[in-house]
Image: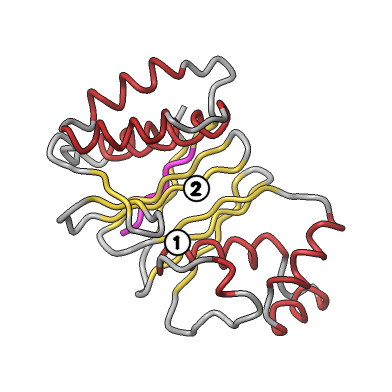
């Protein structure tokens, strides 16, 4: 099963408190270096999104009764985060002040997006989407956010740069589950059919 944990970044977000939370949950030298790389980000919003995404991940692990003390965070050469040497998979996404963390027993990609300006959506669709997606949106059989989050989630699942998927049809071998959350769409991508459960964290 794939579990998705969703939460909104508090308006009173405390960067230092979040960093200390990370240190308590994810122990070990490699994890501290992972944290240091986050803290080097120049923009406060980017640091907050990255830190809070890991907080949500930590809460998710605790909710699933998974011991995080032995887990080591790492990234692939292209930036996909993962747990070293574990058959436990996760994916993170954020949109503005909302964060989603997917935890699964199989490789997974997740993306969350909220509604944007229609003019911008049309421009993005023309630039990135395959012909069948554009036709689906025009006919009303497919909405923009579903198409966009599917692409983002698949890119994360396969550790593929989004640009390399431009105008390409997504393979039939991938499985997608799209959920509505407030004004957002959340899509999970896997390579095998899976049950998806969403949990809102307070």
Q: What range of the chain is rendered magenta?
A: 1-6
The residue tagged with tag 1: helix, strand or loop?
helix
User: How far from the left and from the top, in percent, is residue 75?
Assistant: 32, 52
Which residue bears the numbered disc 1? 156
Which comes before the other along the chain, label 2 or label 1? 2
Colouring method of the image: secondary structure
Picture residue at 40% right of the left edge, 16% below the top: 16
The answer to whether mark 2 and mark 1 are in CB contact below 8 A is yes
Looking at this view, is 126 or 44 the one in front? 44
Q: Marks 2 and 1, how far apart in space?
A: 10 Å
Picture residue at 31% right of the left edge, 35% below the top: 58
Picture residue at 54% right of the left edge, 34% below the top: 46
Query: Is 39 left, or right, of 163 in this rendering?
Result: left
Return the mark for residue 132: none
Main secondary structure of the magenta stretch: strand
Which residue bears the numbered disc 2? 93
Task: Examine the rendered structure and indicate whether residue 102 appears above or below residue 41.
Answer: below
């Amino acid at each position: 099963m794939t579990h998705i944990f969703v939460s909104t970044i508090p308006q009173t977000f405390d960067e230092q408190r979040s960093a200390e939370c990370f240190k308590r949950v994810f122990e070990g030298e490699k994890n501290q270096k992972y944290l240091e790389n986050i803290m080097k980000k120049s923009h406060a919003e980017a640091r907050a999104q990255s830190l809070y995404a890991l907080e949500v991940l930590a809460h998710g692990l605790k909710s699933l009764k998974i011991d995080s003390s032995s887990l080591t965070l790492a990234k692939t050469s292209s930036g996909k985060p993962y747990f070293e040497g574990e058959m436990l998979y996760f994916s993170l996404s954020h949109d503005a002040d909302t964060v989603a963390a997917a935890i699964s027993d199989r490789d997974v990609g997740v993306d969350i997006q909220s509604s944007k300006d229609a003019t911008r959506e049309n421009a993005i669709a023309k630039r990135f989407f395959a012909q069948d997606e554009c036709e689906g949106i025009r006919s009303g059989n497919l909405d923009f956010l579903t198409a966009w989050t599917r692409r983002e989630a698949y890119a994360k699942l396969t550790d593929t740069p989004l640009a390399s998927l431009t105008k390409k049809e997504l393979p039939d071998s991938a499985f997608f589950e799209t959920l509505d959350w407030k004004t957002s769409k959340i899509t999970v991508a896997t390579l095998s059919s899976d049950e998806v459960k969403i949990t809102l964290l307070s």
